[in-house]
Image: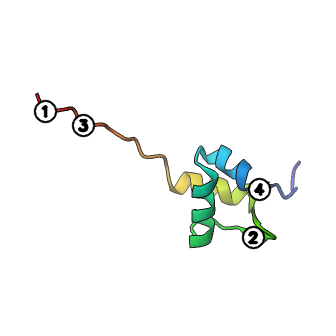
Amino acid sequence: MDGELQLMNSKQAAEYLKVSERRIRQLAKSGALVCEKIGRDYIFRLEDVKAYDIAHPPVLEYRRRKAD
C-alpha cells in the first residue's frame, strides 16, 4: 500500500472522524474538509481526513450541574 492513493466515501469518513454523515457533508460543502464530489457523494483522501482530524481535535462536552 506504499504510495497508493487511499480514498473513502462520506460514510467511511464519518466513521473515521466519529461524526455523522450529515456533519461530513457540511464540512465538505463549507470547504473545511477537502474532497471531490462525484455524483451525489463526496470522495475524500485518507490523508486529508487525517489532517482534518489532527487540526480539529474532538471537543469535550461538560454538563453543568443543576443548582442546589
* Mark pair 4, 3: CA separation: 37 Å
Residue 64 marker: 3
Q: Answer yes or no: do the residues labelled 2 and 3 have beta carbons within 8 Å?
A: no
Q: Nearer the viewer, residue 53 or 16?
A: 16
Q: From the viewer's perspective, is 15 left or right of 57?
A: right
Q: Answer yes or no: do the residues labelled 1 and 4 have beta carbons within 8 Å?
A: no
Q: Nearer the viewer, residue 59 or 24?
A: 24
Q: Nearer the viewer, residue 6 or 2?
A: 6
Viewer-nearest of labels 1 and 4? Answer: 1
List the single residue furthest toward the left: 68
Element at label 2: strand
14 lies above or below 43? above
| Residue assigned mark 1 | 67
Viewer-nearest of labels 2 and 3? Answer: 3
Residue type at mark 1: give it: Ala
Q: Residues within 10 Å of mark 2 (few under 14, many from 20)?
A: few
Of callouts 2 and 3, which one flags the residue occurring earlier in the amino acid sequence?
2
Q: From the viewer's perspective, is 16 left or right of 61?
A: right
| Residue assigned mark 2 | 36
Of callouts 1 and 4, which one flags the residue occurring earlier in the amino acid sequence?
4
Element at label 3: loop
Viewer-nearest of labels 2 and 1? Answer: 1
Location of residue 51 in the rendering, given as x and y in whole percent from the top left corner: 62, 57
* Mark pair 2, 1: CA separation: 49 Å
Q: Residue at x 67, y 44 (%)?
A: 15
Residue type at mark 2: give it: Glu
